[in-house]
Amino acid sequence: MPPSLLLSGAGGAQDAEPACGDVLAWPGRKPAHLVCQGCQQNRQRQDQPFEVRCQVEDQHALQAEAYLRRAHGLPKLQRYCCMWDSTPHSWRDRRTGYGYVLLMATGETPVRTRAAWPRIGNVVVRADGYAQGP
């Protein structure tokens, strides 16, 4: 199972504490090209969120963006200066009450149009999960 955010606990979703699992997947619907590389709790940050890091190869960037927009409401990536970036987007899971912050971005790239995204380089997706509001 790819690492990301899941809920665990004997008391059901309402009583569960967040832990590493896969927050970016609707059950069975996460695209295979959205590859989660790790998850860890960052105890140095306020509220100690679980941080999920994923990558998408350039040829799948448009599909990954479309999935994250549809599944989690991520805003469309915009070009700023020398990279493509979404604004950080937050949402709350209605079942658990846990909050999440999602961001998708590229590194520095000369690619200026969406049509050229297959040459954009790897795209990074980061999701932070909070048991308390961020």
Image (cartoon, rainbow, N blue to C red):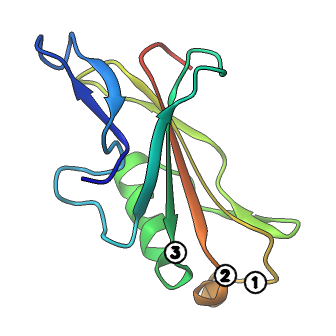
The residue positioned 58% from the left and 88% from the top of the image is 118
Identify the residue under disc 1: 111
* Residue under the point 28% across and 60% down: 30
Pointer 2 and pointer 3: residues touching (CB < 8 Å)? yes
Q: CA distance from mark 3 to mark 1?
A: 13 Å
Secondary structure beneath label 2 = loop
Residue 13, percent across and down? Answer: 18, 20
Q: Is residue 52 left or right of residue 106?
A: left
Q: Say which amino acid is labelled 1.
A: Val
Question: Dot 2 surroundings within 10 Å: few (below 14), some, or many (20 or more)?
Answer: many
Marks 2 and 3, how far apart at CA:
8 Å
Q: Is residue 75 above or below residue 51?
A: below
Q: Which picture quadrant has residue 99?
A: top left
Q: Amino acid at mark 3?
A: Ala
Instruction: Please name the amino acid that badge 2 sits on.
Output: Ile
- Above/below status of 8 relative to 40: above
Question: Residue beneath label 3, please?
Answer: 61
User: Could you tell me which residue is drawn at 45 percent across and 42 percent down?
Assistant: 39
Residue at (65%, 89%) from the top-left corner? 119
Q: Position of residue 34 (x, y in %)?
A: 40, 65
